[in-house]
Image (cartoon, rainbow, N blue to C red):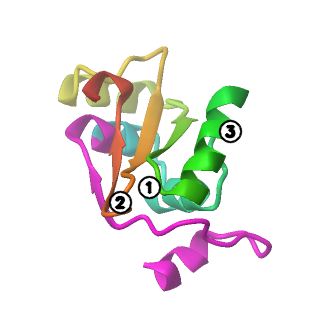
């Protein structure tokens, strides 16, 4: 996985933890498709400590989690730019909200799995 993710890492970035098996929920897949987002680019941000749109307290929680082997959470907002794709995505997965296109990446404490999901699917 590390070799594969290296294609999406910036030159100065390094993996902070292993993602384990990577899975995605139907809603997350629909949002990724609707926004033409690259899930591997999101995963690369997540495992290198670019936590996305989380508050400072959660940043510190993640930093501690990396050191002490706890669950890690990242939040990214994916832009829906194409109205036709947005309509299609909303039909495919009612969970995709046209005003709140956030996706979560959660890596379990034992680093066995990282899940891409919508907040509503938690």
In the image, what residue occupies the spot 51% across and 85% down?
Answer: 3
Specify the quadrant that holds the N terminus.
Answer: bottom left
Q: Find residue 12 and report its image quarter.
A: bottom right
Percent across and percent down for residue 76 are 55, 37
Q: Nearer the viewer, residue 66 or 88?
A: 66
Q: Is residue 97 above or below residue 69?
A: above
Instruction: Tell me the crowding category of disc 1: few under 14, some 14 to 19, or many 20 or more residues within 10 angstroms, Cα based.
Output: some
Specify the quadrant that holds the C terminus.
Answer: top left
Percent across and percent down for residue 56 are 72, 29
Mark nearer the viewer, 2 or 1: 2
- For disc 2, the marked residue is 110
Question: What residue occupies the far front of the structure in this picture?
Answer: 68
Q: CA distance from mark 3 to mark 2?
A: 19 Å
Residue 26 magenta-drawn?
yes
- For disc 1, the marked residue is 39
Q: Find residue 121 and report its image quarter.
A: top left
Q: Quick check: marks 2 and 1 in contact, CB under 8 Å?
A: no
Q: Nearer the viewer, residue 113 or 103?
A: 113
Q: CA distance from mark 2 to mark 1?
A: 21 Å
Mark nearer the viewer, 3 or 1: 3
Work out whether mark 3 precedes mark 2 in sequence or the reverse, and give the earlier one. 3
Is disc 2 placed on a helix, strand or loop?
loop
Residue 64 magenta-drawn?
no
């Amino acid at each position: 996985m590390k070799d594969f993710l290296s294609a999406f890492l910036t030159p100065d970035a390094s993996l902070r933890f292993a993602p384990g098996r990577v899975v995605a929920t139907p809603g997350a897949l629909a949002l990724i498709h609707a926004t033409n987002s690259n899930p591997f680019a999101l995963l690369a941000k997540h495992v290198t400590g670019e936590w996305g749109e989380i508050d400072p307290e959660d940043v510190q929680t993640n930093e501690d989690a990396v050191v002490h082997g706890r669950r890690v959470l990242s939040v990214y907002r994916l832009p829906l730019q194409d109205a036709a794709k947005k309509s299609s995505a909303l039909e495919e997965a009612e969970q995709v909200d046209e005003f709140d296109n956030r996706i979560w990446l959660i890596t379990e404490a034992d680093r066995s799995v990282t899940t891409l999901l919508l907040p509503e699917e938690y």
